[in-house]
Image (cartoon, rainbow, N blue to C red):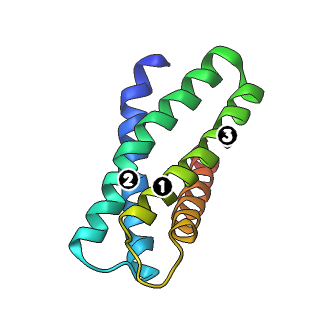
Amino acid sequence: MLKSLPLMMAECLILTILIEGALAVIIGVRGRRNLVTVTLVNIITNPVLVPLTFLVGYFYGLHTRMIVEISGEIAVFIIEGLIYRKYPVHKKLNPFLVSLILNGVSYASGYIINFFAG
């Protein structure tokens, strides 16, 4: 099971970038620089949170994993909102709202994918 961690990390990162990138365009993020920012933000946060939640779940169980996952998602929302505040990607939306939308939809999509994948 631990052998599958690198592949799972790659899958999660690629799906997150695709989902959040597409959604960013839908909500009005324009320009190559802004889309690169959205991508880089995910390259920073996703590879930290995914293995952390996986390993906590593997070693400490589902209940502890959920606590870490929820706490981690809140931390990612804040960190990404701060980055979007420093490097704005949307002209009209609050950077924390952008972070909430992108992360919320991405998280929900991952949850749905995992639910149906088994």
Q: Which mark is residue 88?
A: none
Q: Position of residue 3 (x, y in %)?
A: 41, 18
Residue nearest the viewer, comparing 72 with 64 = 72
Q: Residue furthest right?
A: 63
In the rendered structure, which amino acid carries the disc numbered 1? Glu
- Residue that carries the numbered disc 2 in the rendered image: 41
- Residue that carries the numbered disc 1 in the rendered image: 80
In the rendered structure, which amino acid carries the disc numbered 3? Ser
In the rendered structure, which amino acid carries the disc numbered 2? Val
Residue nearest the viewer, comparing 104 with 115 = 104
Look at the picture and state if 47 lies above or below 104. above
Q: Residue furthest top?
A: 59
Say few, some or many: other residues with alpha carbon within 10 Å of mark 2 (under 14 / 14 to 19 / 20 or more). some
Location of residue 24 by image quarter: bottom left
- Residue that carries the numbered disc 3 in the rendered image: 71
Q: Position of residue 77 (x, y in %)?
A: 57, 54
- For image coordinates 48% across by 57% down, the residue present is 82
- For image coordinates 60% across by 61% down, the residue present is 104
Dots 2, 1 in contact, CB < 8 A: yes
Q: Position of residue 103 (x, y in %)?
A: 54, 59
- Rounded to the nearest angstrom, the CA distance separating label 3 from label 1 is 14 Å
Q: Give left or right: position of 79 versus 64.
A: left
- For image coordinates 43% across by 26% down, the residue present is 5
